[in-house]
Amino acid sequence: MSLTVIYTIATLSVIGTSAAVILYFVAQKFKVYEDPRIDETEKALPGANCGGCGFAGCRAFAEACVKADSLSDLNCPVGGNETMGSVAGILGFEAHKKDPRVAFIRCNGTCNHRPKTSNFDGASTCAIAASVYSGETDCQWGCVSYGDCYYSCKFDAIDIRAGIGVPLILDDKCVACGACVEACPKNLIELRKQFPKIRKVVVACRNEDKGGVARKACSVACIGCGKCEKECKFDAITIANNLAFIDSDKCKLCRKCVPVCPTNAIIEEGFPPRKIVTEEKQECSTT
């Protein structure tokens, strides 16, 4: 073997060794320590990466939990109280139970209640349709029914219901991740308290037009008459901008507001049928 080859091999070996040593010290100098509890916390999460917690995926949420002083302001809607209890156990925090939520579309303007008055020939997305015109009906506040919420849902919790005019949220599949809330350009979807047996009492309307205009556009529109607000004994109903709203955190499901609504804008779901009370006629007797 010639001296040139030996010299070349030796030089490359020295350079390689020197580079390895330099890289080692650089790696040690800039090494980022990662708390091992982050991995453990991430494993306890459902792995949906839906963003419903307010962070960019389960990994980011796990990091936030580990760095936090308390879990009171952190919540995984998909895993619920059980998952957050596991996370609290890992991190040595107190578990804070929160009422489960479920998404609800505040529009009952189906084709039977809200007839079409025009046709839209543009792109079939809610975002585009809502930005360029008021809708195919006279109600500018209602659902345009192109399914942006449906496509945003990772849990198959939304049914388009062709020919109905308003999608349906399947409560038993909804995890309250909030993706549909963000996707709806009409701000029709909200996360409400989930009651046992999936019961709910909701004003299914977002129309802020005055009563006559709202009722003309949709037969079940809220007209802001205030009868429901006066009937509620729990201060769960407020009237603002010609529209009633029921706070699910205050509502006791008494349902007294439902029958007083003159337009049937308040819907009740999950309850047994109401008993029909009949008054017996009594004949007056003379003596």
Image (cartoon, rainbow, N blue to C red):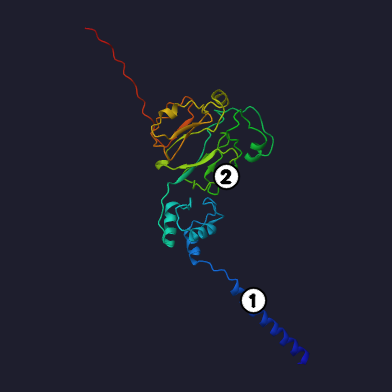
Residue closest to the eye, 30 or 12: 30
To which residue does mark 1 refer? 23
Which residue is found at the position 47% from the left and 59% from the top? 44
Give neighbour class at mark 1: few <14, some 14-19, many 20+ (Cα, 10 Å): few
Q: Image quadrant for the N terminus? A: bottom right
To which residue does mark 2 refer? 182
Question: Residue 232 is drawn in which quadrant?
Answer: top left
Residue 12 seen in the current view:
yes
Residue closest to the eye, 186 or 267: 186
Which residue is found at the position 55% from the left and 43% from the top? 181
Discs 2/1, front: 1
Q: Position of residue 120 (x, y in %)?
A: 67, 33
Callout 1 amino acid: Leu
> Does the residue at mark 2 contact the one at mark 1 (Cβ under 8 Å)?
no
Q: What element carries label 2?
A: helix
Q: Position of residue 118 (x, y in %)?
A: 65, 28
Residue 259: give its label: none
Residue 258 seen in the current view:
no
Q: Position of residue 149 (x, y in %)?
A: 57, 43
Which residue is found at the position 67% from the left and 82% from the top? 18
Q: Image quadrant for the C terminus? A: top left
Give neighbour class at mark 2: few <14, some 14-19, many 20+ (Cα, 10 Å): some
Left or right, residue 222 beside residue 234: right
Callout 2 amino acid: Glu
Residue 280 vertical position relative to residue 233 in the rendered view, above or below: above
- CA separation, marks 2 and 1? 46 Å
